[in-house]
Amino acid sequence: MKVLVADDSKMARKMLIKIFSDCREGQEDEILQAQNGEEAVNLYKENTFDVVFLDLTMPIMDGFHALKLIKEFDSNAKVIVVSADIQQGSMSQVREDGAIDFVKKPISDVKMKQILEKIK
């Protein structure tokens, strides 16, 4: 599985990748990382990803804008928003803009397994 993890926090990226890898133990995965929305969009345009984990609050370009651009580029993109911003308006907006799911940070292994089932 080819995965993009976009978050401005290196620690948040490491934690998400560890949980993802633990849930996919024994599987061959390629995981790329982006530090902001602009990097995420550029990487998405250069690669084919099975899933994108996207934070909302990032410098240069936030996750809201990155999500819109990724979905414009590929309407079938599977984007999971993983954010500490749990305001109802934010959750509604990203679902409206095409995110498959909205997950509160930090993501649990139970939730990760549910997401992996959903995107199969």
Image: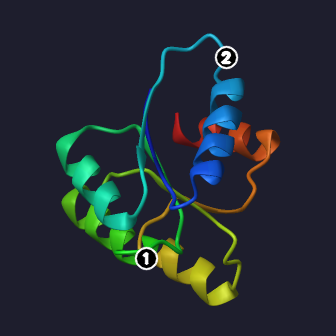
* Colouring method of the image: rainbow
Q: Quadrant of residue 15?
A: top right
Q: Secondary structure at mark 1?
A: helix
Residue wearing tag 2: 25
Q: Position of residue 36 (x, y in %)?
A: 40, 63
Closer-to-camera residue (32/25): 32
Q: Is residue 75 above or below residue 20?
A: below
Q: Is residue 39 left or right of residue 5?
A: left
Q: CA distance from mark 2 to mark 1?
A: 31 Å
Q: Secondary structure at mark 2?
A: loop
Q: Quadrant of residue 55?
A: bottom right
The amino acid marked with disc number 2 is: Glu
Q: Residue at x 57, y 51 (%)?
A: 10
Q: Residue at x 75, y 47 (%)?
A: 111
Q: Is residue 75 left or right of residue 109?
A: left
Q: Residue at x 74, y 51 (%)?
A: 107
Closer-to-camera residue (89/117): 89
The amino acid marked with disc number 1 is: Phe
Q: Position of residue 12 (x, y in %)?
A: 64, 52
Q: Position of residue 20 (x, y in %)?
A: 64, 34
Closer-to-camera residue (119/20): 20
Q: Residue at x 51, y 58 (%)?
A: 7
Q: Is residue 88 left or right of residue 51?
A: right
Residue wearing tag 1: 64
Structural crowding at the residue carrying mark 2, measured as other residues with C-alpha within 10 Å and reported as few (<14), some (14–19) or many (≥20): few
